[in-house]
Amino acid sequence: MANFDIVLWGFIVVLLTGGLVGYFKAGSLVSLLTSGLIAALLAFAALGFFGATTSRSVARFIVGCLFCLFGYRWRVSRKFMPSGLMALAALATSGLLAGFDHH
């Protein structure tokens, strides 16, 4: 398993954990379903369903969009949990994924 895949699977676990916490602590079914859907898309990318190069680009794009979304929510709410934490996790993941080659 390549470093890219390890980082991506790690982020998928964090994303799903966040969805589960949102569901069990706040009763947010939307959080659970959204995290599951996005995690599934990222899992398809990690497994290469979109082709090797395209899958990596798709994963980078999705994680970048999540950073923008969670960053915006953090800025608006001014609450670190959960948006700030997820924004930082997405930012770190984006940085790591950007550091790996496209092959």
Image (cartoon, rainbow, N blue to C red):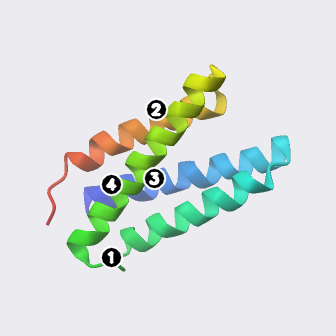
- Residue at x 64%, y 46% (from the top left corner): 18
- The alpha-carbon separation of the residues under discs 2 and 4 comes to 15 Å
Tell me the residue that label 2 is attached to: 88
Label 2 amino acid?
Leu
The answer to the question of whether label 4 and label 1 lie on touching residues, with beta carbons closer than 8 A, is: no
- Residue at x 70%, y 61% (from the top left corner): 33
Q: Considering the image in quadrants, where does the N terminus appear? A: bottom left
- The alpha-carbon separation of the residues under discs 4 and 1 comes to 13 Å
Label 4 amino acid?
Arg
Q: Nearer the viewer, residue 24 or 65?
A: 65
Q: Position of residue 39 (x, y in %)?
A: 54, 62
**Left or right of 71, for residue 17:** right
Q: Which mark is residue 103?
A: none
- The alpha-carbon separation of the residues under discs 1 and 2 comes to 26 Å
Tell me the residue that label 4 is attached to: 60
Tell me the residue that label 3 is attached to: 10
- The alpha-carbon separation of the residues under discs 3 and 2 comes to 14 Å
**How crowded is the residue under tag 4: few (<14 C-alpha within 10 Å), some, or many (20+)?**
many
Which one is earlier in the sequence, the residue at label 1 or at label 2? 1
The quarter of the picture where residue 80 lies is top right
Secondary structure under the numbered disc 2 in the rendered image: helix
**Left or right of 68, for residue 86:** right
Q: Does residue 1 show up? A: no
Secondary structure under the numbered disc 4 in the rendered image: helix
Q: Position of residue 24 (x, y in %)?
A: 82, 48
- The alpha-carbon separation of the residues under discs 3 and 4 comes to 14 Å
- Residue at x 37%, y 44% (from the top left corner): 93
Of the two numbered discs 3 and 4 in the rendering, the one whose residue sits closer to the viewer: 4
Which one is earlier in the sequence, the residue at label 1 or at label 3? 3
Q: Nearer the viewer, residue 12 or 64?
A: 64
